[in-house]
Amino acid sequence: MSKLSIALLAAACFACPPLSAEELTPAERHAALTHAVALYERGEWAAAQMHFVALVNAGDPAAAHNLAVMHLRGELPDASVARACELLMKAASQGFVTAQLALGELYESGRLGTPDLTQALAWYERAGESGSVDAQVAAGTAYFMGRGTAPSAPQAAEWYRRAANAGDVGAQYILGSMYEKGDGVSADLRLARYWYAAAARQGDEAAPAKLKDIDARLSSP
């Protein structure tokens, strides 16, 4: 679960539900979460757990995600992968994208038992629809390799295109290759060149050679 991280509440990560009068105000919730994260970063895990639990009970999805991470990392006396899954489900159901991606990784990892690639893909797609670039790449790879679904190069290309448009260098290179070969898309050397060039600008080491080759092919009679 290398991509899981303790993170502050971010507006980009979830759509905040309306608060009832009994709940913390957004400012109070943010301050409490910031304090809990600071405790965690100082290694005061017991205190951090106490604050995260209180925030989870107040309905905070970021706290649920962070507490799940502590379970997954074995940082709690009662660490439980099953409990981590429950907490991630709670956060994901509230639209917390980081938790949706984490669920995909958890199901793929097999830490819940046998790897469930179908469930993993479902969560990658959900997170990808919400804008997670990592999830878009994971969904593209699942369709490309037939992991949890029948192989589908067109579906893979669609997910890689979303990630490439968001700036993911690996997706840009793969999409260039797909356009070069006509794999899941209509073969188009100019579009292949476009995506290889995008990858090259971000430092991909193989892309410049691909650009040189395609330029030669495009300029030949």
Image (tube, grey):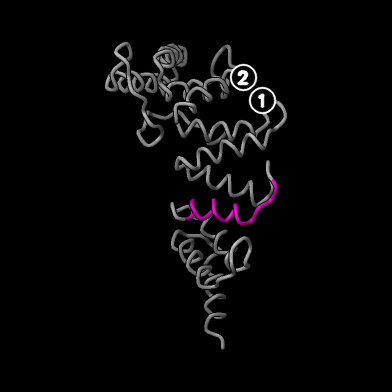
Q: Which mark is residue 205?
A: none
Depth check, front residue: 149 or 49:
149
Asked if residue 66 lies in the magenta stretch, the reply is no
Instruction: Decide if residue 124 is on the left or right side of residue 27.
Output: right
Quarter of the rendering occupied by the C terminus: bottom right
Secondary structure that dominates the magenta span: helix
Quarter of the rendering occupied by the N terminus: top right
For the record, the magenta segment spans: 150-164
Q: Are marks 1 and 2 in contact (CB under 8 Å)?
A: yes
Residue count near mark 1 (Cα–Cα under 10 Å), binned few <14, some 14–19, many ≥20 = some
Q: Secondary structure at mark 2?
A: helix
**Residue 134 drawn at (x, y percent):** 51, 43
Does residue 19 lie above or below 120 as drawn? above
**Residue 37 drawn at (x, y percent):** 39, 23
Circle 2 sits on which residue? Answer: 82
Q: Identify which residue is drawn at 63% across, 63% down.
A: 183
Asked if residue 155 lies in the magenta stretch, the reply is yes
Q: Secondary structure at mark 1?
A: loop
Depth check, front residue: 207 or 133:
133
Does residue 165 lie above or below 61 as drawn? below
Circle 1 sits on which residue? Answer: 112
- Of the residues shown, which amino acid type is indicated by label 2? Ala
Q: Separation of disc 1 and disc 2 at Cα?
A: 7 Å
Label whose residue precedes the other's in the sequence (1 or 2): 2
Q: Quadrant of residue 186?
A: bottom right
**Residue 48 drawn at (x, y percent):** 43, 16
Q: Identify which residue is drawn at 52% across, 38% down.
A: 126
- Of the residues shown, which amino acid type is indicated by label 1? Leu
**Residue 5 drawn at (x, y percent):** 48, 31
Q: Identify which residue is drawn at 29% across, 22% down.
A: 26
